[in-house]
Amino acid sequence: MTALHLTYSDDQATAHDQVAEMLRGAGIDIDDGTTMPPRDDGAGVMALVGKAGSGKTLLLAELYNEMERAGVDVVSGDYESRRNKSKRSLAILAPTNKAASVLRLRGVPATTIHRILYTPVYDPEYERIAEWLANDGDRPEIEGLTDLALDRAAAFYAGNKSIPGALAAAGLRGSDFITGWKRREDPLDIGFVDESSMLDDRQFEDLKDIFPTLVLFGDPAQLAPVNQSGSMVFDGLPDARKLTLHRVHRQDADNPILDLAHALADPQLSFQDFEKMVEETARRDERVVWGQRVEVDLMARSPVLVWRNATRIRLISAFRSVHDAPEDALLEGEPLICDGIELPAKHRKRRIDLEARGLIKGAQVVYMGPGKKPGFSRLHVIGAEDPQVSAASIVKIEKPDEEEPFIPFAAGMGAAFLHGAAVTIHKAQGSQWDTVQVFAPDLFVAARMGRIEAGQPLWKRLAYVAITRAQERLIWVVRNRLSKPTYPLQVDDLRVTPVAPLTLEMEEP
């Protein structure tokens, strides 16, 4: 292996070299920094799998850097240049906005799988700015934009490869320069897919149709998609195409949260023994907390992770109660989860508009207040590159012991939302938060039921996924109690940019 910018563990180095060999077969030599024209058949599929802390994201980031140095173009979901068909390209994908944003925070220009299926249509005048930024062409002269505004756009793009972000820095809004969305017609080249344990078979087949060369990065210890019977898409790959990474141990970066997650691999470990381990860890390390109650202040931006829907609904009801939320309205700052788009088939374009702006099933959203029309909401989509949106909304508030949710307000059709102060561990996959609260009584119930998934007790898979959502601090909540809020719900920190007046708004039928 040639000299690298990083010191790899042995299995990381082996994985790097095998991916490099695969890319050479597809015509991209990241060691020599040379590329050949793309081949229609590509190099097929390879998977890099490993548990949390094994260095998957580090390896993905370095492979991206090496491909960029070799002259490979990065295709994002916000703009696609009219590139030469012989130019090699790479798209870095994640199943959710939040998962993509985790990569972007590490300098990797990721987008969602859904977003790569649709490409924005730019106003021709402003597309000249995008071409200038993406291809380092001639500086355009745009009526109404000063040289200072273009300088701000260029400075932003130099540090963050986002065309919409750069245009926003120049004083433009999405509704100024994006006129619509179109389904991708041509296949792409190389695809890297993070959090691939979340993919189902249909998504995997779609990706193989788009990318002749595909590299999956995934964690085999996570929960499989609900409709996959405990299996993940990379399970069926031949051994030669599935590389396994092991935990990278660094004494100076010891992480008690990862220690707990990896302890779950012990087949002899019982739930009671694991809880003792959590309690002992909490005594010696402040990054793990033995929680006697759910901290309500955290729930607005970091949902409590639960297993059972009944628990989720009870916690949401308690959250709204302690904040004195009215039954017939939402408070600014309440968290929501997108539950899909409720539109008839004839409104396909409107569906594409909403989903392209990040309102896909499972997206985390903060309610910013009512829109200008009845049934419309101003929203902040967590993790989206252009997060401010206003859309026709159907908000459903579930209540304990009631089969039908209460709907405080609703448009005739649009994006549907559930409350997001608590979410199931399944829906939390692909997301990370600085601090995570795990509702341990739910996992105790799962342990008592004795359910097995893919050869492992279900409670261990649930605990592993929940624990590894925490980046800095884990709160293991052991009692069914809720604290009182120390301050009201807030949205001031989300009002960095104004909410765009929507081209996405939909007239009532």
Image (cartoon, rainbow, N blue to C red):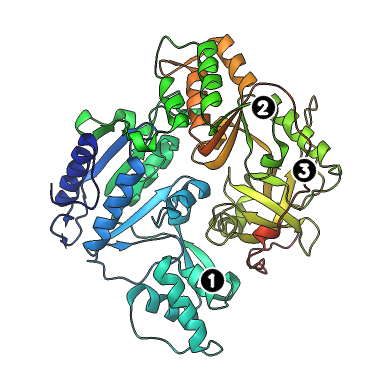
Residue neighbourhood size for the residue with mark 3, other residues' Cα within 10 Å, grouped as few (<14), some (14–19), many (≥20): few
* Residue in the picture at 67% in, 51% down: 366
Evaluate if marks 3 and 1 touch, with contact meaning CB atoms under 8 Å apart. Answer: no
Q: Secondary structure at mark 1?
A: strand
Q: Identity of the amino acid at label 3?
A: Thr
- In the image, 185 versus 99, the foreground residue is 99
Q: Which residue is mark 1?
A: 178
- Viewer-nearest of labels 3 and 2? 3
Vertical side of 505 occupied by 479: above or below: above
Mark 3 or mark 1, earlier in chain: 1
* Quarter of the figure with the C terminus: bottom right
Task: Say whether residue 235 is left or right of residue 148.
Answer: left
Mark 3 or mark 2, earlier in chain: 2
Mark 2 or mark 1, earlier in chain: 1
Evaluate if marks 3 and 2 touch, with contact meaning CB atoms under 8 Å apart. Answer: no
Q: Which residue is mark 2?
A: 309
Q: Secondary structure at mark 3?
A: loop
Q: Which residue is mark 3?
A: 486
User: In the figure, residue 8 lies in which quadrant?
Assistant: top left
Q: Position of residue 118 (x, y in %)?
A: 46, 58
